[in-house]
Amino acid sequence: MDPQTNPALPREAGVLLAISSLPSPFGVGTLGKEAFAFVDFLAAAGQKLWQVLPVNPTAFGDSPYQSPAALSGNPYFIDPALLYEEGLLTEKEVGAARDVSPRVNYGKLFDTRYTLLKKAFSRADRESAEFLAFCRENEAWLTDYALFMALKETHAFSPWYLWEEESKNYDSARALAPEMATELAFWRWVQYVFMKQWNALHRYANEKGIRIIGDMPIYVAHDSMDVWRAREEFLLDADGYPEKIAGCPPDAFTKNGQLWGNPLYRWDKMEREGFPFWIARMRANLALFDLVRIDHFRGFAGYYAIPARDKTAKNGVWEKAPGEKLFSAVKDAFPNAAIIAEDLGFITPDVRELLKKTGFPGMKVLQFAFDAPQSEYLPRNFTTDRAVVYTGSHDSDCTATFVRRLRGERLRRFHLECPVKHGETRTESLIRLALESRAAFAVIPMQDYLGQSSREGRMNTPAEPSGNWTYRLPPDYEKGDLAARMLRLTRASGRSQ
């Protein structure tokens, strides 16, 4: 890998907002007119980047980082109003799907959205040239996705490792496909519609000068198509249960560490085969997004392996991963790929070396900047412009709450490094510090631009098992002069033409 081959990065600003968090009348953000309106808002605000969270389906726990199918799109994001425009839903059916709750209710979506989509599917043209072409072009993963989801539905959406042997075993399960033709067609059609709506939104964003940053989780869920169809790629026992699981060690935030529960990879096998699993994932993500943020980048240098039966992460150990060889293969396959590395957490010299060799821009989160006088997250200590700076992330608190809780030395450092100008709030001064930094990209969570606190704006609290991923942007987010203020800040920092 030669980091010198990476192109220079433009100086740009953007926002962080999940698709699920968009306003919509259907209980969750969708790919409909409100998404297009958000793109218009970003363009008016001088933004060039829109970072989203993973757009894969969610399952138990509602986390987009625990998806049942890592190569597929989330059916909840399909916009019912667009299906109505195609004549696939009635006005009454669309009206029944209305839900303007301020938070996402995933349980309600699970109970109602697939029923609605099946009504639309029953009226769809299953022989259309466009649909059949989509099925052919994506056969490598779509056939297995459809079979897996059809089997999950047959088994009341229970985990695959609890199914009877005929369905649990991938090879024998494929023989069941002819008996499930209609069910398989439905799940293929769901992905076709998702992709059709996504591509329309993506094209519109690009036409407005906005690039979309996607998010690719390092791990896949145990209860996923990815593990079910390729058990040999993971550290599982003979019954399909993990021998070790992913997580992170105890730290200042979690005294027992974090048990993520994802099965670990058989890296030795993947390396011998040339990493086809990862090449397929990168291909899918690069087709969806303009840039791809790789989650938990440090896990590609060394990963934390925890005995699967443990109740805490205290007894985990660090094991080496073949990150350099993997990313050499990725660069060979996709020489022009625009990749961002989420290099946060317990960062050791091998992680820094891997980031240097890849040349990927890393992340700088300003909420981490005030713990020590020479913190690497302080903008004055940035050693390169090849970085993405954030006020906070989807895992951290809203900046309004963060700055309000600063005390002692951390508060003193904040005022020293980020003096609040007349008429500014502390949140606004931290946003300004991010935008004025030398980092090429500055990405600000929408909650911070809105000045929201943790009570109404927090997206995820690590190690908390419930209450996460439900944040929704208020429908009146454009009120006042927000776009104009964002544009002024962006222009003043040299990040907008």
Image (tube, helix red, strand yellow):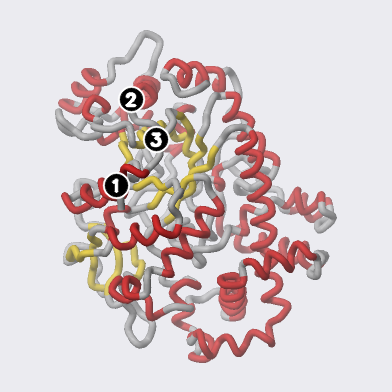
User: Which badge, 2 or 3, is on the more N-terminal residue?
Assistant: 3
Where does residue 102 sit, x and y in percent of width and height?
A: 57, 41
The disc placed on residue 343 is: 1
Rendering quarter of residue 103: top right
Q: Residues within 10 Å of mark 1 (few under 14, many from 20)?
A: many
Q: Which mark is in front, 3 or 1?
A: 3
Which residue is found at the position 44% from the left and 78% from the top?
A: 230
Q: Report the Cα–Cα distance between label 3 and label 1.
A: 20 Å
**Is 148 located above or below residue 23 in the figure?**
below
Rendering quarter of residue 9: top left
**Amino acid type at mark 2:** Ser
Mark 2 near mark 1, Cβ–Cβ under 8 Å? no
**Is 419 located above or below residue 371 in the figure?**
above
Where does residue 264 sit, x and y in percent of width and height?
A: 32, 70
Q: For residue 314, say whether it is visible.
A: yes
Q: Which residue is mark 3?
A: 8
Secondary structure of the residue carrying numbered label 3: loop
Taking the view exactly as shown, the residue that stands out farthest to the top is: 422
**Is 430 located above or below residue 441 in the figure?**
above
Where does residue 222 sit, x and y in percent of width and height?
A: 41, 71
Q: Report the Cα–Cα distance between label 2 and label 1.
A: 18 Å
Where does residue 48 sit, x and y in percent of width and height?
A: 52, 32
The disc placed on residue 428 is: none
Name the one closer to the observer, 193 or 497: 497
User: Which badge, 2 or 1, is on the more N-terminal residue?
Assistant: 1
Answer with left or right where residue 16 lies relative to residue 247. right
Name the one closer to the observer, 488 or 356: 356
The disc placed on residue 437 is: 2
Answer with left or right where residue 99 lies relative to residue 88. left
Which residue is found at the position 54% from the left and 60% from the top?
A: 57
